[in-house]
Each structure stands twice: as structure tokens, then as C-alpha cells.
Amino acid sequence: MTRAHWLDRAYVRLTRPGSFFEDGWGGEGDAREHAAPAFAAQVATPVIRWGRARRVADRVERAGTFESPLASELPAESRVAHVTWISPARRQARAAVVLLGATGDVGPRRRARFAAPLVRDGVGALILENPYYGPRKPPRQRGVDVRTVADLLLLGRAAVDEARALVGWASEQHGAVALSGYSMGGQLSAMAAATLSIPVAVVPVAAPASASAVFVDGLLSRATSWRALSGVADPRAALVERLDALSLPRLPVPVCPRAAILVGARRDGYVAPRSVEALHRHWPGSELRWIDEGHVSGYVRSAAPARAAVLDALERLRAASS
């Protein structure tokens, strides 16, 4: 097995031990809820309330809000979804990409920088703020470290349904749509693609097949509050079972797997390459590309390969639809 990148091993030491799940399991207060949460068969296209457009160089940015499809289950602060739409200034976008956030990726700035070359190529970008993040953060939560396992699962379900709603909006406005994201954002983009009834392009980058690969097996297991989860006989096995309830192998294959391009990091200490390979095997017809990076270095150095993969995946989607 390839040794984790040195930067991953150094960076994880900056993570506060036990910062995730400080209030334990959540939900009913134990680890017995193992059934895979159901996603709605269809998600309605959202009514987005757009703010004033802002010109930035060769593109236009507009912030908007809409009610989350899972508003009734979310904390009050997370019920309104926040999205940023970035489009070319002088022409109609020929396609769109929905970009979902990695763990710790608060606000649109980082993903806006990622999207800028795509926008110049005519691909508009929808950037979704995760539930429990930024203006959607519950008051007792420190930063992005969700307080219970149930919170993490609800974050995932809500973000997936919000992304699916945005795909509906973008497909009505701009035709071909891709989904992409890094790490958790990549996993969420893959889950959205797998639960849509329409063909989309999808590019998960450094994305695990399940969050258990991160919080139990990866270097970030240091951030799991094992003390708070200690009320069961085997906390690790219970956490795997709980997180695997929302894993990609339990979901269908996307409608157009040929338009799915996975990008993995060979020296990833947070998301083991075998987890990326597991998703690739579950999606017959998908392509798997590698970068020789770890998780932390890949966060920066995967941008160009990921953008190329988004454009390639959109081309394959168009070819499959013609």
C-alpha cells in the first residue's frame, strides 16, 4: 500500500482531536439506525431568489437563496439554501456545473476560482453552500465540525437533494449539466448523480465511496470523538455501519456512467485509494484517472485535471444524448 503523502500526515496534526461528533450519535441517541436513508424519487426545481448581479472581470456572479427540499428536517439556520451562479459576461452559458463543497470549504471563493476557466469556456457554475456551513451553521457548532453523526448524515442527504434541485434548474436553463466536488463534495456530487433520473456528467475528485473511509479508516479518524461514541460495544464497527447507510455502493449507478470520470489521489491519507477504486467498480463504464498527490496537496493541484475531466465528461454526455 502506498504511504500517505507527508503533507497529509503533517496537516492532520493541526486537527483538534475529537472535534467531530462531540455530542455523540444524535437522532435517537444510539447507533441502531442503519437502514439506508431514502432519497425522494423526484426533487422539484427550486424557486431561487436572486440578488443583484455583480460583474467580475469576464464573468457575472449572482447570489441566490431557496428553500431546501429537506427544510422540515434541518435546523432552523440550515433550512434556506445559499447558492452562487457564475456565468460568462458576454454570452449564454452552453452548459453548467454544480460544485459541492469539501469538508471545511465555506463560502464560494475557492470554488469560484476553480470555476473561472470553465466559465471562460462557456460553462456556468452553481456553487452550493453546505447545510451546517457558513450562514447555515447552527449556533452551538464550532466551525464546520458537526456535533453528531446524525447531523453529518442529514447534511449529506440535504446537500444531495439541494444539488439535485439545482440540476433541475440548470438543465431547464442551460441543457447539459455536470456535478463535481472535492473529497466530501465529490462524494455528494456522486450521490446526487446516482439518485437522479436524468443523465448528467459527474466528476468526483478524491471522493470516498463512504464517509466511513474518512472518519474511521483515514487520517481524519483523529478528529472523531470516540469518547462521545463509546456507549456501544464496538464504536468503530457501529460508526462504519451508520455511515455506510449513506454509502455509494448502496445507491444505483448513474443513468449515464460513461459520463462519469473519477479523479483519485494515489498518496491520499484521508481517502484511501481503494475507496475511490470501490466507487469505480460500482460504476461500470466510468473512467478513473489518478494524480500523484495526497489529499491536502491534491486540494490545490487537482484543479486543472478536475476541470479537464468536467469538460470531457460533458462531451461524453452530449455524445451519449445525440
Image (spheres, grey):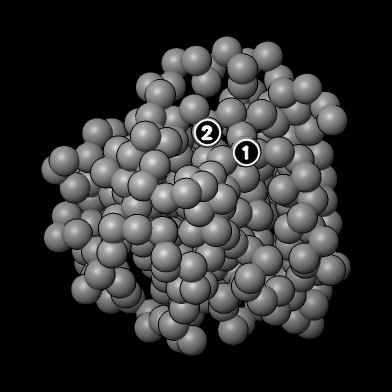
Residue nearest the observer in this picture, 172 or 201: 201
Q: Which quadrant holds the N terminus?
A: top right
Whether residue 166 is situated above or below residue 104 in the rendered picture: below
Mark 1 lies on residue: 217
Q: Position of residue 216 (x, y in %)?
A: 56, 41
* Local secondary structure at mark 2: helix
Q: Amino acid at mark 2?
A: Ser
Mark 2 lies on residue: 221
x 82%, y 61%: residue: 281
Residue nearest the observer in this picture, 21 or 189: 21
Q: Position of residue 296 (x, y in %)?
A: 59, 25
Q: Amino acid at mark 1?
A: Asp
x 71%, y 38%: residue: 272
Query: Is there a contact, CB below 8 Å, between mark 2 and mark 1?
Result: yes
Q: Quadrant of residue 201?
A: bottom right
Q: Position of residue 288 (x, y in %)?
A: 82, 51
Q: Residue furthest bottom?
A: 41
Disc 2 residue crowd, few under 14, some 14–19, many 20+, Cα 10 Å: many
Q: Position of residue 84 (x, y in %)?
A: 35, 53
Q: Quadrant of residue 289?
A: top right
